[in-house]
Image (tube, rainbow, N blue to C red):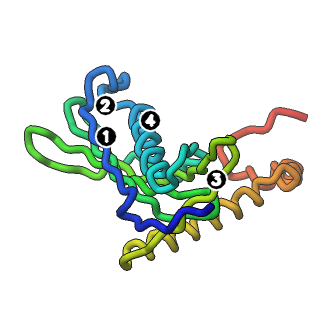
Amino acid sequence: MEEPARPVQYSQTIITELMIPSYANFGGKIHGGTLLSLMDKVAYATASKHAGTYCVTVTVDKVEFLQPVEVGELVSMHASVNYVGRTSLIVGIRVESQNIKTGEIKHTNSSFFTMVAKGDDDKPAVVPALILENREDVKRFIEAMRMKEIRTMVREQMDDAKSHIEVERANEILKDQRCKIHFK
């Protein structure tokens, strides 16, 4: 039985965590992998709240680290379900860090996680429809639809059969690139 539709606000989630020294990379900034792990956590919480069941990460899109995060800052992950398909959800995440001393807040990252709901039988489960209550909800749903279409087009373009043909034309395609071909 399909669940009743749920509004975006129903599953919106914020996770805030203090950035401690053990999260730092060799450059003294917070390691990107730590931030990705926190983003995966908030994506799971948000998707699972909406779906009412366990969800797994399928893809992560547009991970750009816009600004470094410092040890001692509070990092908040703001997540919303932007799109639902039959069994999948796209969760948008905005990452902000706050300097505790100055109160300065900076946007450090935005990303999109595609999640799939799983039933008790470990098979994909149908998720509730998404109720779009304002212009921003509608905008994000349409953007996520377009992003999904672009991902499908890229996947088709990268198909093995097509890339084999491209390798045959490698000298022509790569003539202006910073690489050298050394196989026969």
Mark 3–mark 1 CB contact (< 8 Å): no
In the picture, measured across the screen, residue 14 lies left or right of residue 53, that is left
Image quadrant in which the N terminus is located: bottom right
Kind of residue sitting beneath label 3: Ala
Task: Point out the frontmost of discs 4 and 1.
Answer: 4
Q: What residue sits 55% from the left and 45% below the top?
A: 55
Asked if disc 2 and disc 4 are in contact, CB closer than 8 Å, the reply is: no
| Residue 74 against residue 155 in the figure, above or below | above
Circle on res. 125? 3
What secondary structure is marked by label 2? loop
Residue contact at pointers 2 and 1, CB within 8 angstroms: yes
Question: How crowded is the residue under tag 3: few (<14 C-alpha within 10 Å), some, or many (20+)?
Answer: many
Question: Upstream in the sequence, badge 3 or badge 4?
Answer: 4
Q: Which residue is mark 4?
A: 37
Residue at 65% across, 67% down: 149
In the rendered image, which residue does mark 2 sit on?
29
Residue identifier under label 1: 68
Nearer-N-terminus badge (3/1): 1
Q: Position of residue 25 (x, y in %)?
A: 37, 25
Q: CA distance from mark 3 to mark 2?
A: 39 Å
Looking at the picture, tell me which residue is in the foreground, 160 or 13. 13
Label 3 – label 1 distance at C-alpha? 38 Å
**Chain-order first, disc 3 or disc 2:** 2
In the image, which is nearer the foreground, mark 3 or mark 4? 3
* Amino acid carrying mark 1 in the image: Pro
For label 1, the SS is loop
Tell me which amino acid carries mark 2: Lys
Mark 2 vs mark 4, CA separation in Å: 16 Å
Judged from the image, the secondary structure of the residue bearing numbered disc 4 is: helix
**Residue 147, x across and y down, in percent:** 57, 64
Residue at the front extreme of this rendering: 1
Dot 4, crowdedness within 10 Å: few (<14), some or many (≥20)? few
